[in-house]
Image (spheres, coloured by chain):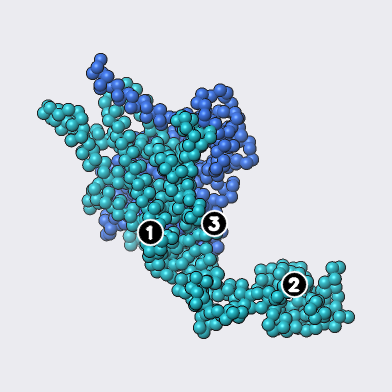
Amino acid sequence: MLVSIFRGKVALALKVIALLLITSVFTMLAQHAFAQGEYAIATFLILATFAMNFVYLTQKSVPLKFFLPGLLFLLAFVVGPVLYTVAMSGFQYQTGNTLSKQEAIVQLEKLGKVQDANQTTLDVTIGRTKANELAVIYFDSANKEFAVSTEKSRTVQNSSTVTKNDFDVPNGSSDFTKLTSDELAALDSKIPTLKFYYDGEYYLGLEGFQAASLYKQSIAYDAAKDEFKSLINDKIYRDNGKGNYSNINNPEEILQPGWRAPIWFDHYKSLFTEKRLRTPFIGVFIWTITFAALSVLTTFALGLLLALALSKALRGRRVYRSILILPYAMPSVMSILIWGGMFDTEFGAINNLLGTNIAWFQSAAFARTAVIVVNLWLGFPYFYLVSSGALQAIPTELAEAAAIDGANPRQIFRKITLPLLLKILSPLLIASFAFNFNNFNLIYLLTGGGPINQLDGDLAGSTDILISYTYKIAFKEGNSNLGLASAISLIIFVLVASISLYGLKKSKVLEDLS
Amino acid sequence: MTKWLADKLWRHIVAISVCLFSLFPLYLVIISSLNPTGSLNLTSFIPTEISFKNFSILFNDPRIPYLTWMRNSLIIAGAVAILSVTIGAASAFAFSRLRFKGKLMGLKLLLLVQMFPAILAISAVYVIMERVQTFAPAIGLGTKPGLLLVYLGGAMGVNIWLLKGFVDTIPTELDEAAKVDGASPMQIYWLIFIPLATPVLSVVALLSFIGTFNEFILARLFLVDMPDRTIAVGLQSFIGGQYAQNWGPFAAGSIIASVPIVIIFLSLQKYIVNGLTAGSVKG
């Protein structure tokens, strides 16, 4: 009975139905993605659909039937983002440089306008001419006449034919009918881009549905030379190769917005050459290493001490053990937030216990101490558990032999137990180092990376580790730099991967594979 | 007597003092949650008055949609646990039991991928999901299904690796016998392997549940609206910078959220310790 679900017609029918469902959902998603110009995502969806149908409808590869779903998830959410990170790190991709170059040029032309000297603003009504051209009607106070302007021309209206609304604003004439409110609503998104003819030099630009100001273009784009020229002071702006048009005589002066320009390895280079980036980067890097090393050292030392203390039969050992692993069993997000309250200056338990009045998170040294103490609390149970395990794995004969030869317990520990223990635990120590290297939650939730030296306008705080610093660079409101953040992420990955690979070599996992 | 002192006393002293260190914050949270004033005041360590006001605030104050947060966390973590084990178990079976070309290469790649900390690609995941949002609003940025997909994908490497480690310890005699009798890999998988592996699979599912429940930053980036938040993000934003006013309800909330996790963890102790020595570190 049960077997029939896995074999025969029922199984085939179930399989075909599932495949049909997946195929239709994926195809639909791919179409939508394609329509939005997301070609990479669309291609992935199509290929995934083909792969699934091929694998599950043929008998080509049985193992693939088992790991294709997992593989697709890994490709979509790990390999894809990693490749995307690599790509982003080669681009100028930050606030002000998020558009494509084409879009940026359109934006620059649109924004490159100045008002006339009197800052004239007119009350207007939007409508259509008899020739069905979009137009505005207004009373031109400078020339004391009613006029209708379309995109290309301006015609003076006979004042007797002009009708006005309650506020004395013209809203119709023999040549002009105003738009209905539905038509206006449909126009809403185009309002900032509409231009109406005024006198050749100036044009009327709309400021909403009922007002327009006189503008003239202040910069002009020359497509042949790919440059912007100021129409006011003749300054020339050229593509600076970094995603902006900049003044050829003063490279610091750039036009906004810019675009996502490929700049290859500039982010990596500037991290090491530009002082503005190098100083915080190196500071954060040194603290990251220090933090990770100190965390491993303190948690391992305390965990080992406990493991040694509880290595022999002792009354209450089971109770001790249960209490000791509580910090490890607690959800760490909660624990970190609780510790945050305990370090409060005025009402916190720590100051009260020590009889001090320290503003823990205001000074670099105290904040760093707090981070290490909290991480010790979070991490020692781990090393207590693994050290206990490792101590049991060490054969007792060695210690006994040494004792017979007259070694005291201290010597036995230093010369025999500790070296053996380190040998067994070194892969875990390295893994713990790698984990703490990226211990984002602790830093972000406890200190937020602070304290920050506000005067520098720097992002990096005294307790920021590389990953929390990267997060700030990537997601700071109004000043995010995804390109630079991606470059630092990749540097971190290379570091962590080398550390982990070194650890794996020690643990012989790689040899076990083959 | 002196021998007892030398041999046992120091052990008790070490154990008791570290126990105090480990219990200290937990004790403070418990007395704070029972303190009716609700404000942060960790200056007296002995409770003077006991009330459950903070707990009732959690369930009645519209500023803290505590139950909604809890439900979000349970649904997301539960779905991630079940789906990731369902998908991961099949992959682990292939890597553990089947023979195929490129298996060693595949294992090495898997090892590399599961080492990659998901947080490093966070800006890329954010931008990609922002783009997905433009054509599939139901699974893009800011949606729970979108977050679920990201969690599933991000944890897939670790889960397959962990599952493979556990699955390797299940004896192969039964499925080899079935193979001799002419069973197909699909039959071996469903009729022999899955029943055998169920205990191991539930352990990994629970571990994955704990991990997801405890995840903070992706949830924080993805779920912006107050009622969409998970318990970790909700409580953090609730307490965020305002330790003074909201401490009592926060303490009560974190206790309720932690108790189930602590219970799961303690009951899985044996497996977790085995997993630890295999080199995985709890996040």
Which residue in the structure is indicated by mark 3?
A477
Q: Are marks 2 and 1 on the same chain?
A: yes
Q: Quadrant of residue A401?
A: top left
Mark 1 and mark 3 in contact? Answer it, CB < 8 Å: no
Q: Is residue B37 visible?
A: yes
Q: Earlier in the sequence, mark 1 or mark 3?
A: 3
Q: Earlier in the sequence, mark 2 or mark 1?
A: 2
Determine the chain carrying the residue at label 3: A
Rendered location of residue A75, percent (x, y): 40, 59
Q: Secondary structure at mark 1?
A: helix
Which residue in the structure is indicated by mark 2?
A121
Q: Is residue B158 visible?
A: no
Mark 3 and mark 2 in contact? Answer it, CB < 8 Å: no
Rendered location of residue A64, percent (x, y): 35, 58
The span from disc 2 to disc 1 (Cα, nearest Å) is 53 Å
Q: Of A68 and A150, which appears nearest the observer?
A: A150
